[in-house]
Image: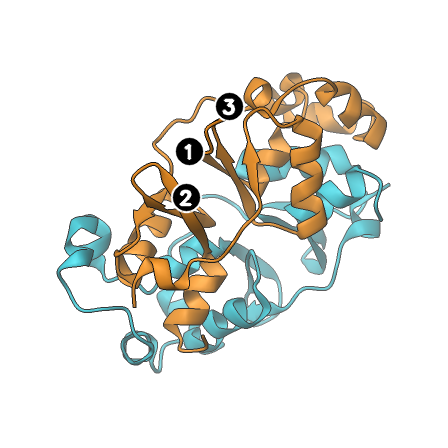
Chain colours: A orange, B cyan
Amino acid sequence: MRAEQIAEDFPVVRSDMEAIDAVRMIAQHRLPGLVITDVSERPMQILPASQVVRLLVPGYVQDDPALAGVVSELTADRICERLSGKSVAEVLPKPSRPIASVNADDTILEVAAVMAREHSPLVAVVAGDRLLGVITASRLLEVALGNR
Amino acid sequence: MRAEQIAEDFPVVRSDMEAIDAVRMIAQHRLPGLVITDVSERPMQILPASQVVRLLVPGYVQDDPALAGVVSELTADRICERLSGKSVAEVLPKPSRPIASVNADDTILEVAAVMAREHSPLVAVVAGDRLLGVITASRLLEVALGNR
């Protein structure tokens, strides 16, 4: 069994998409994270859902979470205000590591090793620069346990 | 809006459960992670799905992922062999930090701050020692964006 065989289609976020639409996408589809590509649709970065949430948290609250209790609430209005008119590229944190990716012919164990090492809820399956699909952690477990 | 109001029921894993059943649970329900409790059902630890995957990867492959390509594949048989007869408590890594949890009356922004800081795909909503429910990152985004 090879990575390409178990990869699934997955909604992809281009870096020039509106940031607010990318956040909506994760909420609507209950995704474990986002795969972000550049404008040529080359996979660039995987942002776990918790780090999409981070985009909504003001910097001073990130620095001191105790402040979260005493400042105003996280509302749809505030989120829109915070992200309005900004592209994904404009709000994205600088990636600290290369994207968690595997090759089409990598084994399930190789996929598992990358996922575990990168603490990533999903990995991109690539052929050169091209995204073939995505493997989520739960998909990998499903396949490894024999429920394909 | 308070944490308790948006918390959802979530399958919980007791530390004396068979490890293989906990792994099956994440695959079957496509969970973003596991909430692990002690035998008195007090929440102890949250294990993101990527770190459940790690339980299946032999130590020498974790140390050197390049070995994953040259050793045998991750199969259902091997997973069962690896975990067979072991409880969740026996295979669980030592938690490096306290469990990502919030109080029942914490605000959505406080939940978001904890989730972002802990890089956790879900947080436990607790009242003292008792688990009231769980908030996943996608649930939090859904509520914050106003689709309740």
Q: Nearer the viewer, mark 2 or mark 3?
A: 2
Confirm whether circles 1 and 3 share one chain: yes
Q: Quadrant of residue B86?
A: bottom left
Query: Chain letter of disc 1?
Result: A
Find out whether the residues at labels 2 and 1 contact each other: C-beta distance under 8 Å: yes
Confirm whether circles 2 and 3 share one chain: yes
Q: Circle 3 — which element?
A: loop
> In this view of the protein, which residue sits in the foreground, B63 or B42?
B63
Tell which circle, 2 or 3, labels the residue nearer the N-terminal end: 3
Q: Circle 1 — which element?
A: loop
Q: Is residue A56 visible?
A: no
Q: Read off the residue under disc 1.
A: A42
Q: Residue at x 52, y 55 (%)?
A: B45
Q: Residue at x 27, y 76 (%)?
A: B78
Q: Read off the residue under disc 2.
A: A131
Q: Residue at x 45, y 21 (%)?
A: A94
Q: Position of residue A113 (x, y in %)?
A: 29, 53
Distance between mark 2 and mark 1 Cα atoms: 7 Å
> In this view of the protein, which residue sits in the foreground, A66 or A76?
A76
Q: Read off the residue under disc 3.
A: A93
Q: Position of residue B107 (x, y in %)?
A: 79, 37
Distance between mark 2 and mark 3 Cα atoms: 21 Å
